[in-house]
Image (tube, rainbow, N blue to C red):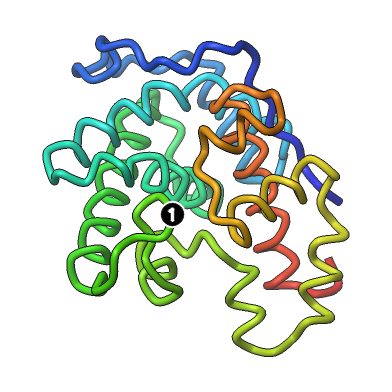
Amino acid sequence: MAIAIAYPGDEDRIDSREEKPRDMHTHPMDDQLMAATAKGDQEAFAQLFKRHWAWSLGVCRGRMGRYRLAFLAEDACLRAWLKIWDNAGKYKCNGKLEAWIGTICRNACVDVKRGWTTRAQDPPNFVGLPNDDTLQAVGELDPIRQLERQEDTKRVRDALRLLTRRQRRIVTLRFWHGATWQQIASVLGLSVRQVHAVFLAALITLRRALKDPDA
């Protein structure tokens, strides 16, 4: 069953204030949402994403900019949000969610930088991801190609059937056609933020199918 993460609004600009340190006071709702996410509540995770995606992307843009790899900021942030989903059960509901998310974002940026500098040998073909090895290193954001390397085309087809039509289009444009986030948004008539949200939901569904074929 596909999950949906919706991000309202069409404004794609990240306000410069999002690059600055935030007040790390967490709203009580956030701890409640994290507790629900830890139990696999997809709607709770969608609410967290809506509340915190913009500033977390700002953190990644600032950090990747210092690495002179700003074009990988969105991929780093998506990696971070996959980690948030995977590790929600490790969060201690202590009112410090933003600090926790910020740490995950910074660690994701380090991972992406390391993957880029140690594995990138060829010019990038899309959004700074030059080949399958680097793609896996910088974020493990391509479960489809992982399956293809295993020559398991049936599982590829079965996994894709779990996605909504919009999710399948975004995954296809991103992984098979090498489209940028901006290009995908233009083709589908969405904001870039909405594309990120749909893409993240698709990745979670695909990774779940990979780990548990009977899911």
Residue 70 locus on image (x, y percent)? 25, 39
Residue 199 locus on image (x, y percent)? 63, 44
Q: Residue at x 22, y 54 (%)?
A: 110
Farthest bottom residue? Answer: 151
Q: Residue at x 85, y 57 (%)?
A: 162
Amino acid at the residue labelled 1:
Phe
Q: Quadrant of residue 103?
A: top left
Residue 120 locus on image (x, y percent)? 26, 70
Within-10-Å neighbours for mark 1: few <14, some 14–19, many 20+? some
The answer to whether residue 187 is above or below residue 118 is: above
Does residue 111 appear left or right of residue 212 in this picture? left
Q: Nearer the viewer, residue 8 or 84?
A: 8
Does residue 139 appear left or right of residue 86 in this picture? left
Q: Quadrant of residue 210?
A: bottom right
Q: Residue at x 69, y 49 (%)?
A: 202
Quarter of the image containing the C terminus?
bottom right
- Secondary element under disc 1, as helix, strand or loop, is loop
Does residue 22 appear left or right of residue 134 in this picture? left
Q: Nearer the viewer, residue 73 or 59?
A: 73
Residue 41 locus on image (x, y percent)? 72, 39
Query: Disc 1 marks which residue?
Result: 126
Q: Residue at x 18, y 65 (%)?
A: 117
Does residue 117 appear left or right of residue 188 in this picture? left
Q: Nearer the viewer, residue 105 or 199?
A: 199
